[in-house]
Amino acid sequence: MKTHSKTKRLSMFVLASVAAAALVGCGGGGSASSTPAASVAPVVPVAAVNQLYSESNATSNTIVRMTRSASDGSLSMADTTSTGGVGTNGLTAAGTAAAANPLGSQFAVTVSTDGMTLFAVNAGDDSISSFSIDPNGKLTLLKRSATTGTFPNSLVYSKGYLYASFLGTSQVIAYSVNSDGSLAALDTKSLAAGGAFVPTQVRVSPDGAFLLVGGKSSSILSYPIQANGSLGAAVRNTTTIAVPFAGVFLSNRIYVTTDVATASLSSYTLNADGSLTPITPAVVATGQGASCWLSITPNGKWAYVGNGNGSISLYSVSASGALALVNVTAANEGIAVAGDSWISADGKYLYSTYLKDGSVVSYSINDATGALTKVGTKMQVTPANSTASSSMQGVVGL
C-alpha cells in the first residue's frame, strides 16, 4: 500500500492551490419439493433501505454508517467499516491543511444503482475501495483497488462501470467492476488536454450516454460513453459561470451546476454531440459565499445548494430546466461548511454534511414549498475540532 510522499504532494501544489483558493469560505432448509428445479424462481438479493454513509477520510480511512428513521428521517449512528486504505486526514493534494473539503470534490462515495455495492476513494494511497451492502445496510469490504491516477476525489457508477476523477493527475479513468468488487481499468483520459483542468466531480447522464466532468476552469468536459464503458473524445464546453463545481442531471439532457465564484446556480441542455447550451445562465444567491454542493429532489422540483458560509439555498426547477431562487437561506445551522448532501428516494428528506464540523444534519422537505425543517440531532461523523477542519468527505444513502 503506497502513501504520498512530501515531494509528490508538493509536485501537485499548483492544482491544489487553485482548489483551495476556490473553496475558501467553501441479502432454510425444508422438505424436498415436487416442483421441477428449472421452474424455481431465482433468489433476488434484497437491497437495504433507510441507510446513510459518509467517509471519515482519516489516515485509517473508514465508512461511517447511519440508519434513517422510517417515521421522521432522523439519524442514528450504526457502525464504521475500514476501507483498507488511507485517507488524507484533512490535507489537500499539496499536503497542506484545508479550511474544509480537502478532496475538493462532490461524490467521494457512491452506491451502485442496484443498491448492493458502495465505492469510496482513498486519496491518501491512490486507491478505491468496494464494499458489499447486506439487506440490513451493513458493509463488508470486498476489494481495495490501486489506481494509476493520483488523489482520486469523485466517483460515479453506471451500468457496471465506475468512473473516477483524479485531482493529482488531472485525469478521469473508466473501470469495469468485477464480480468480486475489484476494478479493471478500461480507459484513461487526460483532463488537461486543451488546457488546465482541476476536476471536482464526475456524473453520468441517466441514460448512460455521457460522462460530464466539472471543474475549476470555466468549463465542463463531456465524454460520450462507448458500449464497452470506455470514453470517446471530449467536448470542452465553456460555461457561463467561472467555477462549475458540482452538477446534477435533472433528466437525460438537462444538467444543473453550481458556481463557486459567484455563489450561483445555472442549467444547460446537453446536446447529442456533447455540447452544452445554457437554459438559465446564472441565478445568484447573494452573500452566501462559495456555492459548491448540489442536490435535486427526485421529482425535479427543488434544488438545494450548500454554501461556504454554512447556509443552504433553495431554488425551484421547472421541467425545462429553468431556475429561480426561492430562499437564499433555507437552512443555516451556524456551522461551516454546508457540503455534500443527499436526498432520499421518496424526496422527503435531505441530509447535509457540514464539512468543517464533521457532522450530518437531517431535514424534512415540504414538497409544496421546498422548505426545510430540521429533524433529530446532528450526527458526528468525525470529531469536531474548533481549531482545524474535519477530514470527512461525501455522503450517500439508500
Image: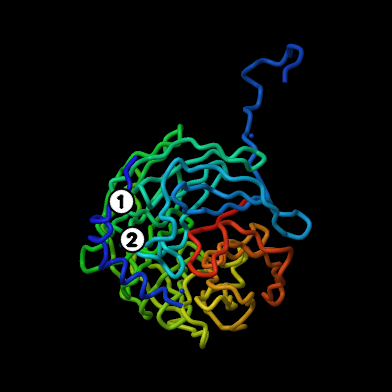
Q: Amino acid at mark 2?
A: Gly
Labelled pair 1, 2 in contact (Cβ < 8 Å): yes
Quarter of the image for the N terminus: give it.
Answer: top left
Residue annotated with mark 1:
4
Residue positioned 74% across, 14% down in the render = 33
Residue positioned 45% across, 32% down in the render = 180
Q: Secondary structure at mark 1?
A: loop
Q: Tell me, yes or no, if residue 272 can be seen here.
A: no
Residue 306 horizontal side relative to residue 182, left or right: right
Q: Position of residue 327 (x, y in %)?
A: 62, 83
Q: Position of residue 109 (x, y in %)?
A: 49, 53
Question: How dense is the environment of label 2, judged by Cα within 10 Å: few (below 14), some, or many (20 and up)?
Answer: many
Gap between marks 1 and 2 measured at Cα: 9 Å
Front one among 195 and 230:
195
Residue annotated with mark 2:
95
Q: Position of residue 57 (x, y in %)?
A: 47, 54
Q: Secondary structure at mark 2?
A: loop
Q: Position of residue 185 (x, y in %)?
A: 32, 42
| Number of numbered discs overlaid on the protein picture | 2
Front one among 308 and 264:
308
Residue 339 horizontal side relative to residue 281, left or right: right
Upstream in sequence: badge 1 or badge 2: 1
